[in-house]
Image: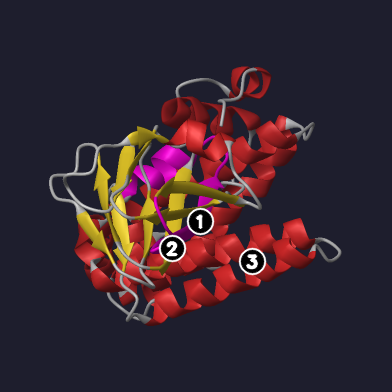
Amino acid sequence: MDPLEDVLALLETRGHLSAGLVAGGQWAVRFEAPQGVKFNSVRRGSCLLEVDGVDAPVELAEGDCYLLSHRRPFTLRSDPEAVPVPAAPLFARTEDGVARAGEGDDTFLVGGRFSFGARAQELLLDRLPPVIHIPADTRHAETMQWALSAIDQELTHRQLASSLVAEHLAVVMLVHVLRLHLAREPHAVSGWLAGLADPLVATALAALHQDPARAWTVAELAHACTVSRSTLAARFKATVGQGPLEYLTRWRIELAARQLREGGATLASIAHAVGYGSESALSVAFKRILGKPPGDYRKHPPLS
């Protein structure tokens, strides 16, 4: 299995489209911290993006995209001197799916947000920088522009299942953002995401995700990667921050936690499915990783 695909599926990744923003003249709009991960694409014009806690503004040109992976307030503006107005009243007055700021239509942005399940913060979002900027001259930006155009078509013409198609296209955009970031700045992420940027570690991660219930040893995993045990162990620990078997334990617990959140499978069947020989073995590992026994977790799962 593909570890990135696995994690995004585990996190119940969903895309949500929002109203567009048309702006002109001197303008600035102040946004509260978004619920989820915000993304935008500049379809026309240019502007500045300022995110709380990030030192320098990001200059956005036509065709650029960006992703805000942390929940922080931010401002879009035409220039540093423009006085911000709050976004909420502007977007409450949208017409034909568009909010307006300033005078004119020099700049046009479209976008939305991604929402995730309960474990996204620790498994994905904490491992990303607050802002990921995708310049227009990259292959990934071209794909995002295509996806946004397709989304526009779906939501404009409202064919059968158009909202579902639009949501899936938005997730395609997220995958391309993560691919670009890993290719461009492999050392700017940590944990399993960093492992995906290392060919050897990525091979080991894929093997673990392909068969998480297998009683792996480091020697068997190294054989699957055609390297020595010591080479794999050192490279995996240096890149991911934990050894291969520790990673496997944590991934098994994530899989078990999803089954507990989703329904009524017995603890014994869950333990067998994720590679534990008994309920008690799973319970010990589960409490060590997530801080509570499986029964308590099922009764009181974490909120998204």
Residue at point 79%, 31% (across, down) = 264
Q: Sequence-wise, which precedes: disc 2 or disc 1?
A: 2
Q: Quadrant of residue 211?
A: bottom right
Q: Is residue 48 magenta?
A: no
Residue at point 35%, 76% (across, down) = 136
Local packing at callout 1 (Cα closer than 10 Å; few below 14, some 14-19, many 20+) is: many
Q: Residue furthest left?
A: 55
> Which residue is more in the foreground, 228 or 256?
256
* Picture disc at residue 29: none
Q: Is residue 124 magenta?
A: yes
Q: Which residues are magenta?
A: 103-127
Q: Residue furthest right?
A: 160
Q: Where does residue 57 sit, x and y in percent of width and height?
A: 19, 51
Q: Report whether 233 appears left or right of 19.
A: left
* Picture disc at residue 41: 2
User: Residues at badges 1 and 3 in contact (C-beta under 8 Å)?
Assistant: no
Cα distance, mark 2 to mark 3? Answer: 12 Å
User: Residues at badges 2 and 1 in contact (C-beta under 8 Å)?
Assistant: yes
> Which residue is more in the foreground, 242 or 162?
162
Q: Please tell me whether mark 2 sits on a helix, a strand or a loop.
A: strand
Q: Please tell me whether mark 1 sits on a helix, a strand or a loop.
A: strand
The colour scheme of the drawn protein is secondary structure
* Picture disc at residue 151: 3
At label 2, the amino acid type is Ser
Q: Where does residue 257 sit, x and y in percent of width and height?
A: 60, 36
For label 1, the residue is 111
Is residue 298 at least partly visible in the picture?
A: yes
User: Residues at badges 2 and 3 in contact (C-beta under 8 Å)?
Assistant: no
